[in-house]
Amino acid sequence: MSDWIDEILEEFEALMSPSWDATEKCLVPLVNIEDRNNEIVVMVDLPFVERKEDIDLSVTEDRLEIIARMKEGIKWERWGTCQKQLEFKTFRKSIRLPEKVDPEGAKATFRNGILKVLLPKVRKRYTIKIL
């Protein structure tokens, strides 16, 4: 039950948190997670990232971490009574996966600004003894 509550709180926090982090100067990319029969497919939108060498991926059984460097930074300015200026240079996202996966079997492709990560699910098979 606590896993279910943790999952709901994490989803709520993701909805309520901003899509950027000013201290780290990074943006949070748009992500789509599809839970298929034998694998989990994660699609990540990474505009302004041109090469696969600019993307760092790490995966554990239950989490996927993505860091991607942009070709050029995106500047945001706000002028008024309070002046702010930020430049975002990276994308960063940590994703809690819906099921355990086999990190060694993970595969990724990057084309036209879209990162696709295929993560095979861990399937445990038990032998049952007949008494």
Image (spheres, rainbow, N blue to C red):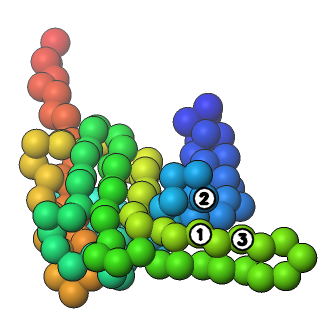
Q: On screen, 41 above or below 10?
A: below
Q: Secondary structure at mark 3?
A: strand
Residue 22 point in image, percent of width and height: 60, 58
Answer yes or no: is residue 11 visible.
Answer: no
The tag earlier along the polypeptide, 1 or 2, is 2
Q: CA distance from mark 3 to mark 2?
A: 11 Å
Left or right side of 131 for 34: right
Which numbered marker is on residue 22?
A: 2
Q: Residues within 10 Å of mark 1 (few under 14, many from 20)?
A: some
Query: In which quadrant is the N terminus drawn?
Result: top right
Q: CA distance from mark 1 to mark 3?
A: 7 Å
Q: Amino acid at mark 3?
A: Lys
Q: Residues within 10 Å of mark 2 (few under 14, many from 20)?
A: few
User: What residue appears at the point 73 percent right and 80 percent down from the top-left corner?
Assistant: 78
Q: On screen, 11 above or below 19?
A: above
Q: Find disc 1 in the rendering and name its residue.
A: 86
**Are dots 1 and 2 in contact, CB under 8 Å?**
yes
User: What residue appears at the point 35 percent right and 78 percent down from the top-left corner?
Assistant: 72
| Number of numbered markers | 3
Q: Secondary structure at mark 1?
A: strand
**Are dots 1 and 3 in contact, CB under 8 Å?**
yes
Q: Find disc 3 in the rendering and name its residue.
A: 84
Residue 41 lies in quadrant: bottom left
Residue 126 point in image, percent of width and height: 16, 28
Q: Amino acid at mark 2?
A: Ala
From the viewer's side, name the closer residue of 45 and 9.
45
User: What residue appears at the point 13 percent right and 18 percent down from the top-left corner?
Assistant: 129
Which numbered marker is on residue 123?
A: none
Q: CA distance from mark 1 to mark 2?
A: 7 Å
Query: In which quadrant is the C terminus drawn?
Result: top left
